[in-house]
Amino acid sequence: MVVEILFEEVCGLYGDGQNVNYLQATLPQAQFVRTALTDEPYFAEHTPDLIYIGSMSERIQRRVIEKLRPYTARLEELVEKDVPILATGNAGEIFCKHITYKTEETEIDGLGLVDLTVETDYFNRYNGKVLADFEGMEIVGFRSQFSFMQGDNSKNYFLQVRRGDGLNKKSKLEGFRVHNLIGTNLLGPILPLNPLFCEYFVGLSGAQAEAAFKDEAMDAYRQRVKEFSDPEVKF
Amino acid sequence: MKIKYFVALYVAKSAQTAMRLLGRNATFLPGKLAEKLCKNFLSYMTPPKTVIAVTGTNGKTTVSNLLTSILQDNGYSVTNNSFGSNVQAGIISALVADTKLSGKPKKDIAVLEVDERSSLRIYPYMKPDYLLCNNLMRDSIKRNAHTEFIQFIVDKALPASTKLVLNADDMIASGLGTKGQERVHFGLEAEIPEATEPQHIRDIVYCPQCGELLQSQYVRYNHIGRHYCPKCGLKSPVPDYCITDIDRDKNTFTLRHGEESHTYNLINDNIVNAYNFCGAIAVLTEIGLTPEQISKGFADSKIVKTRYEQVDAGDLHITMLMAKGQNPIACARCYDYAAKVADPDKALLLIVDDKDDNIGNSESTCWLYDCDYRALKDASIRQIVFAGPRCKDHYLRALLAGVDAQKIRCMESAKDGANAIDTTVSKHIMVLFEMYRADEAAMVKKVLKDRGERGV
């Protein structure tokens, strides 16, 4: 089994980098290919079983898009082949059609695999929590972002939000899912925070594995689900 | 507008007096009031002759306190906000307190600790003569996002007239000053040892000018070190003020500036503080103090007790060390420091959850995963107790870092945490506490002292 981690050296803000370690602890036999911004992606010539990319700064985001642009058709092919790809924080935005950076007064076309647009504003930081449903699981997570995705994700959303916001403040449908390409604004340690989702994501590749430190992770997960479900806890 | 300013000044001063009579600090609200009554209040104030701003992710308070103390020791009168808030309202409050009814400043110098996020609300209106930036590192996810953002806003806010005193070993901080500002740099000699294992997070990896992968002459911690770009030639600046030696046996350090070297008293041997001391000396020298004047201040200074304290009780030795919750690098440096303290049987009590974020809320624990827990694996740490509402999250995080589950315990309250330590195993207990949980830290200290005195 091969897991490709894209640009870990710069796409691991907000604790996202530790999703990789959690995957590694969950899949101790897997080969982890860490593709740097200066490397040719492994997926260009091979088909990884899983791909992960985490949060990044806005400057890096533009660089990542330019890096991946020549591989757009190949990425599209992998998506069609149902290769599981997880993009957390603002990483999912690179797959959208267009990103406007309001503060820096610049804009860029994304990879266009998802029919959504993005607006980023340094002077409008958004923080939030999410309690959501996905495939019979309760998903918990955190958001901290300068950007919001805009558009209609009603046919390809990732999470049905119970508490918190979805794609934007008016929506209860969070992120997107196209085949097994999952983009979510939830950031940080989404996999250790959601061990059941970690098992689900790994399972999309056909592999079966128990989430690492499952008992301890489930303990923390249950406490968080309970807190997030408590009406006294503000959202 | 001037009338509006004076009305706001008098109201703020009255509020300050009233609050102090009621026994309150008056370090935030008067400033808030002044700003509400007079927009851009700061821009109408007459600043002291010299304004020094101290900013950066970690070490602001330590450096501000040190600067203030040494300046006062040398006969200067100083306005300082270190005991209050470091955002706009706190800075206005400190300045209002030291402004005469005529609007003239009472003090010679202002040493202002400035929150990076507040830069745009402060520097354009109260232009600092000197700005010291210790470091720009990953900080609160919610407020500070990432270092590129913080560097962007600090740089945007800085006036061209401000002389910059920057950490040469921090390529992000030393990247400030795109308006041609005059600058000096400070740093530590490469030979001064520190951890060299691969860093958990680095906030600068590629050249900010050309995008090439940076090469490192050495890395001291995180991105602190000396780097260069093999493509465009960008490199860490050479420090004008450089610590060339730290003698932990004699408790001294030597700093070279130009052709001269001077030895100073080492107030605290944490490497992070070496940078703080170096930056402070650079500023003091720039404003005209001699090494002798500065040295005298170093001999007298101590790290504030609320930040670092050692207590003996019976056969127990207790170290109280302030950590910063939600700040992954500051917290990791505390873990690292604790691991390196020479004692083979230490116990660590960690009370680092964000108190406010857990009241009617559920704290974002993303920062735990940016924080390097590997130091907690050190064999000299025999017991670890995580105390607080997020103890289960810390536990999982520690396991993922490879910490032995057998030495970890989780307790919901700080008091239970203090009682959970096995004092037959560990005689040295290090309590790392979040800065806003000082009240719980005091209670824990009392419990541990009591246990030490009673021998239980």
Image: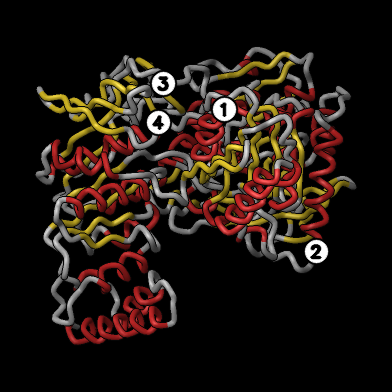
Between the C-alphas of marks 4 and 3, the distance is: 19 Å
Does dot 1 land on a helix, a strand or a loop? helix
Tag nearer the camera, 2 or 4: 4
| Separation of marks 1 and 3 at Cα, in angstroms | 19 Å
| Disc on res. B339 | 1
Tags 1 and 4 both on a single chain: yes
Q: Label 1: few (<14), some or many (≥20) within 10 Å?
A: many
Give the mark nearest the N terminus, 1 or 3.
Answer: 3
Name the residue carrying label 3: B219
Q: According to the image, what is the colour scheme of the structure?
A: secondary structure
Circle 3 chain:
B
Q: CA distance from mark 1 to mark 4?
A: 14 Å
- Write down the residue under mark 2: A230
How far is the residue under mark 1 from the one under mark 2?
38 Å
Residue at image coords 40%, 31%: B269
Residue at image point 36% right, 69% down: B89
Quickly name the residue at label 4: B269
State which tag comes first along the sequence, 4 or 3: 3
Give how far across and how far down residue A151 sits, in percent: 63, 54
The reply to whether discs 1 and 3 touch (Cβ–Cβ < 8 Å) is no
- C-beta proximity under 8 Å, tags 1 and 2: no
Q: Which mark is residue B414?
A: none
Numbered circles on residues, count: 4
Q: Mark 4 — on which chain does it sit?
A: B
SS of the residue at dot 3? strand
Residue A196 visible in the picture: yes
Read off the chain for label 2. A
Residue B351 is left or right of residue B407, and the answer is left
